[in-house]
Image (cartoon, helix red, strand yellow):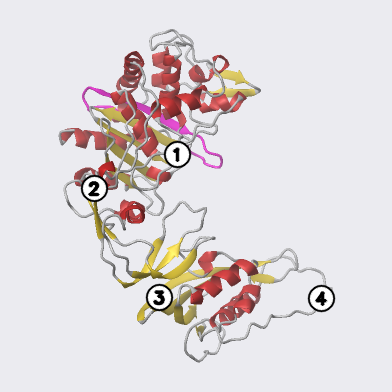
Amino acid sequence: MVGGMIAVAVVGAGVGAYALYDGGASAEARTQSADHKAVKKGPLTAAEVQTTAKRYLADWQQGKVTQAAAATDRSTAAAALLTGYTKNAHMTGVTVTEGTPTGAKVPFTVKCTVSYKGLTKPMTYATSLTVVRSAKDGKPYVQWHASVVHPDLADGDTLVTGESGTPPIKAYDRDGGELTTAKYPSLGPVLDGLREKFGKKAGGKAGIELRVVRGKTSKESDKTLVELSKGTPGKVKTTLSPTLQAAAETQVSKQKNSSVVMMRASTGEILAVANASHGFNVAFQGSLAPGSTMKIVTSTMLFEKNLVTPDASHPCPKTYKLAGWTFHNDDDSEIKKGTFKLAFGASCNNAFINFAPKLSNSDLTTEAQQVYGLGMNNWAIGVPTFDGAIPVQSGAQMGASLIGQGGVRMNPLNMASVSATVDTGTFHQPYLVSPTVDNRTIAKASRTMSSTTQSELKEVMKYTADYGTAAKAMAGLGSDYGAKTGSAEVDGQKKPNGWFTAYKGDLVAAGVVQAGGHGGDTAGPIVAALLKLGSSLGG
C-alpha cells in the first residue's frame, strides 16, 4: 500500500498495531477448499469477529488488496477503493491501531502520510468496521462500506490527492466581514458550494490537497481533508447579514433537526440560512413534504379559478373520501359552518381536498411553476439548491398534494420564496451571490398573480397570524404580516415535521423542525424571532 519498506508488526490478541509497506506484495487469491457442511447460522462469536477483522486489516496493510477485498462482502467495490487509497490518494506509511470490539463492530485508528510531488503531511483518523455473517455460505465477512476506509466517505465516493479541483475562496457577508464555520457553524456546506461555483471565477489559485470526491448521485459537495499546500483564495461577497446569520445559528441550536432561511421579499436576497445539523444543508437542498404550508399555493390556484373567496361559506368535514381513500383532519376536527378563511387559519385539510373533483391533475403543478417558479430545476442562487417538486398526480395522491403531502417536496428556501411571492405579488428568485458577479441567468416565473388574488392571499395569511394556528408565534410582531403553519406526516416518525413560513414587511422567513411536531410550536418561534429582529434593524 505504501512506498518504502516498513516492517509488519506482529498481529496479537486484543489491541493490535500494524505497519504497511508498498504494493510490491503479490496479489495471490485466497482459495478455499470445497466444503459440504451445513451453512452456519446464528450470531457471530467474539473469535469470528476478531479473526475476520485482523485478517482484513493485516491483508490491507500489507498491500494485499485482493485478499483484503476478499475478506469483505463486496469484494469488487472494496478492491477498487483500497487500490485507489494508494494510487489516487497517495496515502503511505500507514499504521493501524485496533480498538476494543463492541459486539460485531471493531474500531481502529489510522496513521499515515499523504505524499504528492515532494509535499508530505501526516494524517490521523479513526473509523470502524463491522463483521457480518453471510447468509450464502455462513462465513464471517467485513461488511463493506466506503467508511471502512475513511469515515467521511459515503458509498460511491473516492479519495484523491492532487491539485484541488477548484481554488479556495474567502466569502464575505454583505457588510464585508469574513464568513467562517468557526463563526457560523451552519455555513460549511454553503462555503463548499461557493468554492465550487466561484473558486476560479473569483481569481483564486488551486492548492494541493487530499479531498473526498463525491459520487455521481451524492447531493453533497466535495470535501477537503488535508491541505499539503495552500492555494490563493478568490474572494466572493454574499447577501448574508452578519446579525441575522448569527441569530439564525442561535435559533436552530435550540431545536434539534431544525432549519431556517430568511430573505428580502422585494429582491430575493438571502439574509440568513442555518441548520441544527451541519453536515447537509436541509435549508437549501432538503426534499421534504411541506404539509399545510403548501396550502398557500393551493389557495392561489383556487382563488385564480374563482372556486372560492376568503369569506365564502365553505365547510371542512371531519372525513372526506377520494378515490378510495378517507382523509382526516388533524385531531379529527371539523368545521360545519364557517368560511374558507377560517378553514385556512385552522389549517383544516378537508376544506382543500374536497375541491379535488373540480380540478385537473396538472392544476397544482402548473400553478406552482408558473406563479411561484417552483419545480423547474432552474434556480441559480450561487450554491446548489433543490427547487421543489410538484409532480402531476391523480386520484387520492392528487388530493394529498393539495395539503402538501403525496409527492410534493420542498425545503425552507422554497417556502420562504412562496411567502415572498405573496408579499410582493411577483416571484423573485432567491440568491446568495448577486447575479452581477458572474452574469448568470436567474429564474423567472412565466406570469404573476392578479392584485385581487394577492389581496385574498394576504387576507387569509394575516387571519392565520392574528387568530389561527400561527397566532401564538406571531404575537407581538405588529401589523403588515402573514403566516402559515404546517405539519407533515412522515412514515416511521412518531411526530410530524413542523413547518412555518411568514412575512413581515419586506422580510420573509421559513423553517422546518423534522420530527418536532406542529409547526406553530416548533418552527414558528424560530421564524418569528428572526422576523422580529429583522424588523428592529429596519427591515
Q: Are marks 4 and 3 in contact (CB under 8 Å)?
A: no
- Position of residue 307 relative to residue 471, above or below, is above
Q: CA distance from mark 1 to mark 2?
A: 30 Å
Q: Which percent across, then down, holds residue 351? A: 49, 17
- Which one is earlier in the sequence, the residue at label 1 or at label 2? 2
Q: Residue at x 30, y 44 (%)?
A: 439
Please tell me which of labels 1 and 4 falls first in the chain: 4
Kindly identify the residue that appears in the image at 50 percent across and 33 percent down.
408
Amino acid of disc 4: Asp
Residues 232 and 441: in front is 441
Q: Is 479 included in the stretch rendered in magenta?
A: yes
Of marks 1 and 2, the one in the foreground: 1
The location of residue 445, given as percent across then percent down, is: 38, 28
What element does badge 3 sit on?
A: strand
Res 111 seen here: yes
Image: magenta residue range = 474-496
Q: Earlier in the sequence, mark 3 or mark 1?
A: 3
The x and y percentages for residue 71 are 64, 74
Structural distance between the alpha carbons of marks 4 and 3: 41 Å
Residue that carries the numbered disc 4 in the rendered image: 35
Q: Callout 3 environment at 10 Å: few (<14), some (14 to 19), or many (20+)?
A: few
Q: Mark 1 sits on what residue?
A: 377
Q: In the rendered image, which residue does mark 3 sit on? A: 124
**Which residue appears farthest toward the right when viewing the image?**
36
Q: Nearer the viewer, residue 118 or 367?
A: 118
Question: What secondary structure is found at the residue carrying circle 4?
Answer: loop
Picture quadrant of residue 121: bottom left
Q: Name the residue carrying label 2.
A: 246
